[in-house]
Image (spheres, grey):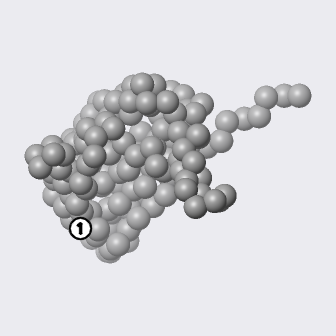
Amino acid sequence: MKAVVQRVLEASVTVDGQRVSEMGPGLLVLLGVGKGDTDADLTWMVEKLATLRIFEDADGKMNLSLEDTSKHLIVVSQFTLYGDARKGRRPSFIDAMEPVAAKALYERACEALRQRGLTVGTGIFAADMKVALVNDGPVTILLESPPKAAAPV
């Protein structure tokens, strides 16, 4: 799994002119699911998102996590994080998980975040979404679940 994590003062998602999610301070997460991602990747990503210390404490140091602060995030599915543009001029998305399985893993990630006591807004899977945000800092972090161990030869 891959994620672009942005600390925001506010964020919203609009689909077909209708606001489907909005929040004040928290995290906006663009989440991509790749071929071969498993529940282990989901568990790693959920733990990292909930506990990543990127919010400032009283001394101005990044020592607080989402669980320590607003507890609000919006998670938007983003298969284009798996776009490979190293060759040619059009990205290839062959490393993205197929949509049915990707949607299931994405929805389970959102539910796992809710089970941690977080307030989770979402976009609409596979919709044409308009995402608005006010980045705070700006603080933007790229996360990728650890690579799978290679099978013994």
Tell me, yes or no, if residue 38 can be seen here. yes
Q: In the rendered view, would you say 109 is above or below 147?
A: above
Residue at horizontal 28%, vertical 40%? 127
Task: Give the residue at the far left of this rendering.
Answer: 18
Closer to the camera, 50 or 134?
134
Closer to the camera, 8 or 89?
89
Position of residue 66 measured from the top left corner of the image (x, y, whole percent)? 31, 51
Position of residue 9 measured from the top left corner of the image (x, y, whole percent)? 21, 65
Tell me, yes or no, if residue 63 can be seen here. no
Q: Quadrant of residue 11?
A: bottom left
Residue at horizontal 32%, vertical 73%? 137
Q: In the rendered view, would you say 147 is above or below 59?
A: above
- How busy is the neighbourhood of tag 1: few (under 14 within 10 Å), some, or many (20 plus)? some
Q: Secondary structure at mark 1?
A: strand
Position of residue 67 measured from the top left corner of the image (x, y, whole percent)? 30, 47
Position of residue 62 measured from the top left corner of the image (x, y, whole percent)? 38, 67
Which residue type does callout 1 highlight?
Val
The image quadrant where one finds the C terminus is: top right
Residue at horizontal 77%, vertical 34%? 150
Q: 26 left or right of 109? A: left
Q: 39 left or right of 59? A: right
Residue at horizontal 43%, vertical 30%? 99
Closer to the camera, 93 or 131?
93
Give the tally of numbered discs.
Answer: 1
Q: Quadrant of residue 145?
A: top right
Closer to the camera, 133 or 69?
133
Q: In the rendered view, would you say 95 is above or below 137?
A: above
Q: Which residue is mark 1?
A: 134
